[in-house]
Image (cartoon, rainbow, N blue to C red):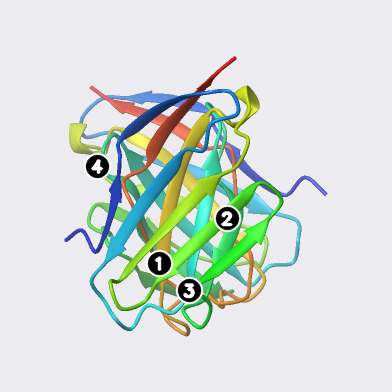
Amino acid sequence: NAGVTQTPKFQVLKTGQSMTLQCAQDMNHEYMSWYRQDPGMGLRLIHYSVGAGITDQGEVPNGYNVSRSTTEDFPLRLLSAAPSQTSVYFCASSLAGNTGTDTQYFGPGTRLTVL
Amino acid sequence: QQQVKQSPQSLIVQKGGIPIINCAYENTAFDYFPWYQQFPGKGPALLIAIRPDVSEKKEGRFTISFNKSAKQFSLHIMDSQPGDSATYFCAASTSGTYKYIFGTGTRLKVLA
């Protein structure tokens, strides 16, 4: 099992550009999520999905879109990048999203810089 | 709005020491409190977790102490080793919400 994979590892964008961060998991997990990690802020939930076709907003969803067409993939789209979106982005997955019993597995992260 | 406060921001201990990282929460609906360990360039990984019905949980050299009345929980690392040098995050969640709230992280360095 590859676990949770993320591409690209690094990305530099100019303000206003759009891009998609890719996330895939091969553990047949129903629950997937996206976090951003900023110095002194910990990890903050952007969007999450409890299954194919179902997504919901987290703590900081503005400026980001998601969709879940398959169980395996959960891409994160930046529609018009802003310098405030410079961050390290982590994708995570768990069996069913039950925060009390399911272990959440994180990908290796994507470091995004917006100039 | 920060609902889980973590301290200290950084910590340096000698090998064999017992670093203690503290977290405090406000939301009494939280019922699951995990700790994550993150090495540089890697994603966080679950280390140990506790529910409020117990006051302490041990897994190997890692112990969580939980004080429900004070709304605080702590991570203790016994006989710390240089390989424990990492960033540690506490988190909290409420069953059924699918959401975790993370603390701001503690960067631990264990000197050889």
Badge 4 crowding class, 10 Å Cα cut-off, few under 14, some 14 to 19, many 20 or more, is some
- Nearest-to-viewer mark from 3 and 4: 3
Badge 3 crowding class, 10 Å Cα cut-off, few under 14, some 14 to 19, many 20 or more, is some
Residues at badges 3 and 4 in contact (C-beta under 8 Å)? no
SS at badge 4: loop
Output the chain of dot 3: B
Q: Mark 3 — residue? A: B32
Q: Which mark is residue B92?
A: 1
Task: Please tell me if label 1 and label 2 are on a single chain.
Answer: yes
Q: Is residue A96 above or below residue A3?
A: below
Residues at badges 3 and 1 in contact (C-beta under 8 Å)? yes
The disc, 3 or 1, on the residue closer to the chain's N-terminal end is 3
Q: Position of residue A84 (x, y in %)?
A: 19, 37
Q: What kind of residue is marked 3?
A: Tyr
Task: Please tell me if label 3 and label 1 are on a single chain.
Answer: yes
Q: Spatial distance from mark 3 to mark 1, Cα to Cα?
A: 6 Å
Q: Mark 4 — residue? A: A80
SS at badge 1: strand
Instruction: Identify the residue at image location x=52%, y=50%.
Output: B36
Q: Mark 2 — residue? A: B63
SS at badge 3: loop
Q: Is residue A85 above or below residue B108?
A: below
Q: What kind of residue is marked 1?
A: Ala
Q: Spatial distance from mark 2 to mark 4, Cα to Cα?
A: 44 Å
Output the chain of dot 2: B
Residues at badges 2 and 4 in contact (C-beta under 8 Å)? no
The disc, 2 or 3, on the residue closer to the chain's N-terminal end is 3
Q: Spatial distance from mark 1 to mark 4, Cα to Cα?
A: 32 Å
Output the chain of dot 4: A
